[in-house]
Amino acid sequence: MKNTALTKIHESLGAKMVPFAGFNMPVQYEGVNIEHHTVRNDLGVFDVSHMGEFLIKGEHALELVQKVSSNDASKLTVGRAQYAYLPNETGGIVDDMIVYRVHEDIYLLVVNASNIDKDWEHISKHNTMNAEMKNLSDDYSLLAIQGPKAVEAMQSLTSVDLRAIKFYHFEVGDFAGIEHVIISATGYTGSGGFEIYCKNSEVKQVWNKVMEAGDSYGIKPIGLAARDTLRLEMGYCLYGNDINETTSPYEAGLGWVTKFTKEFVNHEQLKDHKLNGVHRKLIGFVMDDKAIPRGSYEIKDADGNALGIVTSGTMSPSLNKGIGMGYVPPYAAVPDNKIYIQIRKKLMPATVVKFPFYKK
């Protein structure tokens, strides 16, 4: 089990630590609901240093990124990022990721912790053009400072104008007394804020200064459980739950980051999915009555016929209703359509809704 550079700090703060993607991670401190509302209303900080970071550089860097990424990285200028996925050779998804253009010929790919080795192997396999690749995952830490008070609270820590960093943009600058830190507005919570990429040797200083600067704004450390409820309220996919090696991106609603302006791994099959359609679609749904849907619960129609499976589900702290995601046939994936979730021996009614569940 790996630790992050901040594990001892989490333990000293009374965090409940759990194994996650091979790491010893804080799942919660005070409780999921309290932490969730802290991020929605004020300010919270997550240690997400388990995430993977790959540097792709040199004259063939863009060529490799274009080959393995679903999105069109040629559209990126320095200081911009894009959401994308790594298509596999069988119509599914190796992983989803964020691609940053750090310099003209340097790209940073940020991938999920559970997939670091698999992703590295996949990208390496397609690196026939010999682009320079470096796996930085074990050397770098990542903090997500999230919430509506993030800009105001953190501005004293940097000479970079935080208000000027738009969504899916980033700056490389000073932060918390450390030079050359990536300050990125690519959050996973829907409540604004920043991600800070720095070296493991620097992250304790950054954490302490972030907590100090945020003290008068009600900052609290937040665990992975609240991160999950926050992302689910936004309808963001979680790899391993809502997307995986057998999920077509067109089933998962990821056509918007699938760009056929260039050739990439398995683009022919994915173009077929786009043109001819797929057999199921990812939906969001809200429970009509007091009930909590969970992953692997069955989704059925009014007659009890199976439609699909819930992939993510929870009691939404913001809406105070049960919400979930899952796959159903396209005819059942229409907003306002009535579906039923099998919870123990009961069929509980739910309504299909458009993402996101949470609207500011």
Image (cartoon, rainbow, N blue to C red):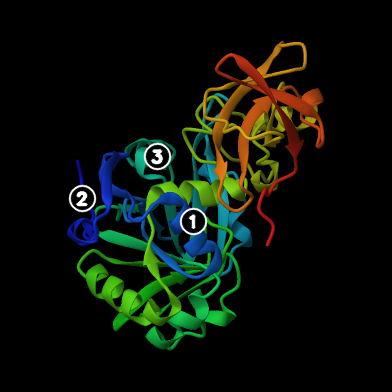
Q: Which amino acid does label 2 sit on?
A: Asn
Q: How far is the residue under mark 3 from the one under mark 2?
A: 21 Å
Q: What residue type is labelled 3?
A: Asp
Q: Camera-side residue: 6 or 87?
A: 6
Residue at 65% across / 47% down in the picture?
Answer: 257
Residue of label 1: 36
Q: Position of residue 70 (x, y in %)?
A: 59, 44
Residue 263 shown left or right of residue 182 in the figure: right
Q: Camera-side residue: 65 or 91?
A: 91
298 up-or-down from 114: above or below: above
Which of disc 3 and disc 1 is earlier in sequence? 1
Direction front: furthest residue: 290
Residue 119 tag number: 3
Q: Which amino acid does label 1 sit on?
A: His
Residue 251 shown left or right of residue 178 in the figure: right
Which of disc 1 and disc 2 is earlier in sequence? 2
310 up-or-down from 32: above or below: above
Residue 276 tag number: none
Residue 85 shown left or right of residue 327 in the figure: left
Q: Nearer the observer, disc 1 or disc 3?
A: 1
The secondary structure type at the circle numbered 3 is: helix
Where on the picture, by quarter, is residue 87?
Answer: top right
In the rendered structure, are the residues bearing label 3 and label 2 in contact, judged by CB atoms less than 8 Å apart? no
Residue at 52% across / 28% down in the picture?
Answer: 295
The answer to whether residue 237 of the structure is visible from this angle is yes
233 up-or-down from 219: above or below: above
